[in-house]
Each structure stands twice: as structure tokens, then as C-alpha cells.
Image (cartoon, rainbow, N blue to C red):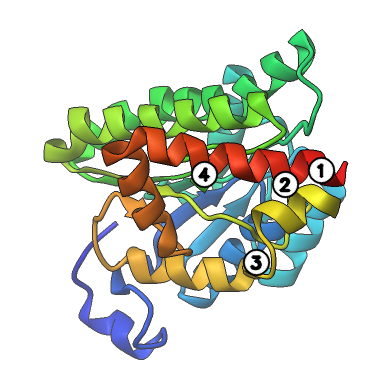
Amino acid sequence: MTTTADSSADSCPASDPAWLDGAGVVVTGAGSGIGRALARRLAQAGAKVVVNDLDSAGCEATAREIGALAVPGDAASADGVAALLAGARAHLGQVDAYFANAGIETGSDASPAAWERSFAVNMMAHVHAADQLIPDWLERGEGRLVVTASAAGLLTMLGSAPYSVSKHAAVAYAEWLSVTYGDRGVIVQCLCPQGVQTPLLPGGALGDVVFGDNVLTPEQVAEDVMAALHGEEFYILPHPEVATFYATRATQPERWLRGMRRLQAQLNSRT
């Protein structure tokens, strides 16, 4: 991965980061939603893309669409990440950027199994990826990890304790990585959107109360990520108001909690 490449200016749109031209990138959760839109945009920017998803058919479909390599599998396990990176390195030579986008939302299911799977996919997937990528990146002096968390990881999410808590953990881990390795060439960024039109988006009363009409398309989120790849800022917030909500939560916690309880009361009255 390079940050200066004169020849790339002619091969990708001016709005795309020049370092992506020819870079080797991996996108997990690329069978649908944000992952698919992001893989598409990275390929358009000239990146060499490897896509992963537990949904083999979706993964293969994305790969065919954009001319990428599909390595289906479970990116939430250490063995699954090892297999993914082995396939990616064989195809790319090296991995310059890893977009840890796979996620799961169990809704109102707060069973032990739901908690376990939520932490495996929404948090431990990032741990396994970092464990296997960062040693190489430290040796090379460069690398980029983009963690897809959620605004729920900065705020909370009504109706789904496993999702909220595991996304908080993802944000905290990404922050720790940035603090620990940010001065050694490893760039860590954390994507925290609110409502996005993906299979994880809650519907019904919960969707109406929490998101209303403020729902973005995966393509809109992908464009925000592309813009953020020009720099190194940690948070990527497709919904800018999340920063205001986050500040209120930090500086006026009681006010924040009262407001969230009102939203919960609205939800209770409709269910």
C-alpha cells in the first residue's frame, strides 16, 4: 500500500484515494449490504479485492459482479480468518487493507447462544483479524483496518442487548488498536452508521421509533467510507448527528438516559 502514486490519478476517479489503485484489500460480510457496496466501490477505485461471507452464494455473486476473488467462510473464527487470509495472500500477494464488515443482529433473542454468536461475529472477528494481520503490517510499517461497528456501539440499540453490547466492545477494541499501533504505521478506522438498508435493519415499530425515515442506502455509506480513506480519522459517521448524540451521552448522561427511556416507552406503547 502506498500513499503517493502519480500514475493512479489517471486510472481512478479523482474522488477516490490514490493509494487504493492496485492495493490488495479484503472485505468481509460482502455478500450483501454495506459489504457488497463497499467491495464494489473499492474495485471501481482500482483495488484488487477479495470478498468473504458466510453466505457462499452471496459472496460468489459479489465476486462475479466486480471481478474479485471469493473466499466464502466464517470470518468470526480464528481458523476462518486464517483460511481467508491464506486465500487472499495467495491471490493478492499481500493484504494492504482489511474491511472487517461482517455483523449479526439477533433482535430480541438474548439467549446464551445469541450472546455467544453476537460476540463472535461483532467483536471476536476483529480480534482474530488483527491478531493475524498486525504482525505483518508492523514489519512493513503500514496497513489499514476498517472495523464496521455501529452507532449502537457509541449509543445503544433498543430491543437488542447482545447487539448493543457487542458493538460497544467492537468500538472499544478498535480504539485500543488505534492507540496501541497508530504511531507504528497501522491505521485503524471505525465505521458507525445508524439505520442502513441492509438485512440487519430492524423493521416494524422498532425501526419506526429508532430510525424513522433517516435510513441510508449501503451505497451512501460506501461513499462515506471512500471519503474517509483519504485520511486517517478514527470515526466514520455516515449519520453526522451521531457525534452530537455521543457528546450528549458523555457530558449529560442523565439527560441522555431519560431521552432513551422516552423512546423505549414509545416502543412499548406500540408493541
Gap in angstroms between the C-alphas marked 3 and 4: 20 Å
- C-alpha distance separating marks 1 and 2: 5 Å
The residue where tag 4 is placed is 259
* Residue linked to disc 3: 215
For marks 1 and 4 on the same chain, the one whose residue lies earlier in the sequence: 4
Extreme left residue here?
Answer: 183
Q: Which residue is mark 1?
A: 269
The residue drawn where x is 36% and y is 34% is 253
State the residue at coordinates (53%, 33%).
167
How crowded pointer 4 is (Cα within 10 Å; few <14, some 14-19, many 20+) is rated as few
Distance in Å between CA atoms under marks 3 and 2 = 19 Å
Q: Residue at x 81, y 23 (%)?
A: 109
Tag 3 secondary structure: loop
Q: Are marks 2 and 4 in contact (CB under 8 Å)?
A: no
Q: Which residue is mark 2?
A: 266
Q: Is residue 171 above or below residue 245?
A: above
Q: Amino acid at mark 3?
A: Val
Residue pictured at 53% horizontal, 77% vertical: 44
